[in-house]
Image (cartoon, rainbow, N blue to C red):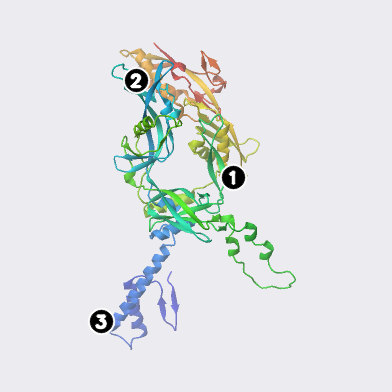
Amino acid sequence: MAVTVTTKQRKISYLNQDFESFKKDLIEHVRVYFPNDYNDFNESSVGVMLIELMAFMGDNMSFYLDKRFNEVFIDTARERKNVLKHAKQLGFKTSIFGKAAATGKIDAFIRVPAITQNEKIEADMRYAGKAKKGTKVTGTNGKTYEILEDIDFSTIDPNDANLVVVAETDQDTKQPTFFALKKKDADIKAGETKTTTFSVGGYQSFLKLTLPDDDVLEILNVKDSSGNIWYEVDYLAQDTVFDSVSSTSSDSTSVPFVLKLRSVPYRFITEFNVDTNRMSLIFGTGDSQRFDGELIPDVGDLSLPLLGKDNFSDFTIDPQNFLKTRTLGLAPIDTVLTVRYRVGGGTDTNAGTNQITSVSEIVYEVANSSLSQNIVNDVKNSFSVLNPNPVQGGRDEVSLDEIKHLISANFAAQGRAVTAEDYIVRSLSLPAKFGSVFRANAKAGILNKNSIELIILTKDSNGNPATASNTLKENLKNYLSRFRMLTDSVEILDGDVINIGIDFGILVKPDFNKSEVLGNCILALKDFFDVNKWSIGQPVVLSQLQKLLFDVVGVLTVFDLKISNISGTFDGRVYSSVPYNIDQNTKNGIVYGKDNAIFHILYPLKDIKGFFR
């Protein structure tokens, strides 16, 4: 819609946005309103020069206004600093805008001497110690990776042939002299740990300290000279964090740590500057040298001053009255902060299979200090690593367009568990050191629709589904407490395992080996019923099993396919104690399970039985 303003019967347009439009309208304006004063519109005249200068200024102002207006919106913003401001405004954690480091797993090996015990030669597990967290390994790409957890070789069963093998034998007696120990799936991450210190003087609210290195991946640890540990939080008003405490309960093998909520008055947040590529630590506003009772103003002092007055005027409240409380955490005062952090990252930290083979730095400890130090050093020097799978996840700085999409995705995300599916996802995301939730299912309570019944299963040491231990359930309860809606109540229940067996018959095509075809059928069913492919409440569709067997090369037809429940002790094998009537729960060729149970074939080579004709 055209916008015009009439001033002394002169129409002026405000819609021009480019040089030619400004010039055209200015010339027309002079022609109409000043015909006797100026009429020389030759391109080389002084008047046209002045008109072009004014058109140039208008064009620049229009461009500036358009650009500033575009920076107001995420989709049209082009300056990184403005995009970063949008991200912060929408609660996005800006520290991920920098590089990311590749992560993966390695297998670790050591060589220990042999020892004779009870007339049996085996590995001397006294020398099986720990390769400490922070051990550095190097890939063929020249990048350094750090081991994120202690690698404890002492927990290896010396009789496990998969993890303990003969490494060297005596040439004369042919008896083992050294054994190789293998520890699988140790977590590693690209980067190097660095340390820096900051001297802090008097009180300063929102103290900001910038680390001296580029490409900081994460803050590992912050301590002050008084021994206080400062914790990183997502926002300064967050006063609790998850913390891990070593478990001493009987299930500590499967659940090594107990999850606790720790109150953290000593806390900070991180901020990444995309222009300088540096990370900063920002602390709170609380003054540790004064009590909160002295710092929080009396509510009565902030009320309207009506006492004894019939009328009153406006008055202001000083927001500084609130800034020195511990609501936003304490500020460090007269101390020295020691910051440990990891730097690195980038796409060049990705590594292929078997490309991480060198050990550049290791701290190795054994429990028995009286052992021969020379042998301990030999064991330490024998430490080697290999990555059986690629190490991935490394990337360079996030591009501007990627940042915009990440902001939109973050804005649509939520930090609360609202639906039953949210509780399932949160349960499965519990860190493994607090126990592993293998499968989960959730549904609304029968009597209280605001309650959630969360059914979970874990795995035993043999990889079979099992009920969760009390420590795991307690950890899960504490974990979910941070995401639970205020009106929700969550009841964590044990899932059931329904052990089943399969009987079937096949007719084999001519010219095929019947035993071989039957064996392939059993292997196909074993793979189909792999527990990692099944979920709680998932039914068994008999037509799928028939098609699976039909697809085995050499099978002409399938008959007498039957599923049965196996519970208790049978033929010397111990099964789940959960009985289940398969016939009563089969309808239209589908075997339905319970919404709190999972079907499982415990002994595939025994419980899958077939015959041929």
Q: Which mark is residue 485?
A: 1
Q: Residue 521: where, in percent of width, then height?
A: 39, 19
Where residue 188 appears, x then y in whole percent?
39, 39
Secondary structure category for the residue under label 2? strand
Asked if 56 appears above or below 39 in the picture, the reply is above
Q: Say which amino acid is labelled 2.
A: Pro
Helix, strand or loop at mark 3:
loop
User: Quadrant location of the N terminus?
Assistant: bottom left
Q: Residues within 10 Å of mark 3 (few under 14, many from 20)?
A: few
Residue 481 sits in quarter: top right
Looking at the image, residue 75 sits to the left or right of residue 353; the answer is right
Describe the element under mark 1 as helix, strand or loop.
loop
Q: Mark 2 or mark 1, which has the lower sequence index?
A: 2
Q: Which residue is mark 3?
A: 42
Badge number at residue 176: 2
| Residue 283 in view here | yes
Residue at 36% over, 31% down: 374
- Tag in front: 3 or 1: 1
**Label 2 to label 1, Cα distance in Å?**
61 Å
Q: CA distance from mark 2 to mark 3?
A: 105 Å
Q: Residues within 10 Å of mark 2 (few under 14, many from 20)?
A: some
Residue 552 drawn at (x, y percent)? 36, 21
Q: Which mark is residue 130?
A: none
